[in-house]
Image: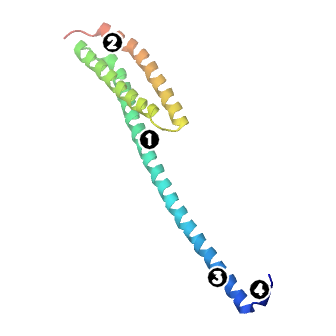
Amino acid sequence: MSALTKLKISSKLSSVIGAALIALCVMGGIAIFATGKIQDLGHDLYSENKQFLGMEMSVSIGIERAIADVQSAPSELNLETLKAKQAHFRAVLADAKKVLGENLAGNAAADVKTGSARIVTAIETLETASKKVFDFAASFAQPE
């Protein structure tokens, strides 16, 4: 302790400035590391968001196409065309359920998985209700 009191004021000030400079360099290093980490997290968030939006668009388009098949079924008078629409309807919904199933199996957030499960349930309800529509339309359709 007595050695510190014997130092000149200029030595003490130089030591304080040196310590401040070292602290500034450490803080700069931490800031650079944090910036890189934030950039990586931002890139991951962008990738997940892009994947989620692609899935959402794919499922939405599939469901809209399936609804269009159901809505146009009562006006179809050709039985073969009606059966083709029903097959297309089932294929489109199967694709949508497959995409949602992959989302449920993946490492998505819990709320995304819950939402996907709700959509799968709604698709199954749509399939049940559409069967009645297709059966009713088939009762009026003719083979040719």
Q: Earlier in the sequence, mark 4 or mark 3?
A: 4
Q: Nearer the viewer, residue 33 or 133?
A: 33
Decide: is 96 above or below 143: below
Would residue 82 be found to the left or right of residue 28 on screen? left
* Lower position in the chain sequence, tag 2 or tag 3: 3
Q: CB under 8 Å between callouts 4 and 2?
A: no
- Asked if the residue at tag 1 contacts the one at tag 2, i.e. Cβ–Cβ closer than 8 Å, the answer is no
User: Considering only vertical position in the picture, is 17 above or below 55?
Assistant: below
Residue holding disc 4: 3
Q: Nearer the viewer, mark 2 or mark 1?
A: 1
Q: Quadrant of the N terminus?
A: bottom right
In which quarter of the view is residue 111 placed? top right
Q: Nearer the viewer, mark 4 or mark 2?
A: 4
Number of the label disc, if any, that sits on residue 18: 3
Tell me where residue 97 appears, x and y as whole percent.
40, 27
Mark 1 or mark 3, which is nearer to you? 3
Colouring chosen for the image of the structure: rainbow
* Residue 55 horizontal/vertical position (percent): 40, 38
Q: Residue at x 22, y 14 (%)?
A: 80
- Asked where in the image residue 106 lies, by quadrant, the reply is top left
Q: Nearer the viewer, mark 2 or mark 3?
A: 3
Lower position in the chain sequence, tag 1 or tag 4: 4
Residue at far left of view: 144
Rounded to the nearest angstrom, the CA distance separating label 1 from label 3 is 51 Å
Dot 3: within a 10 Å radius of its alpha carbon, few (fewer than 14), some, or many (20 or more) residues?
few
Label 3 sits on what residue type? Gly
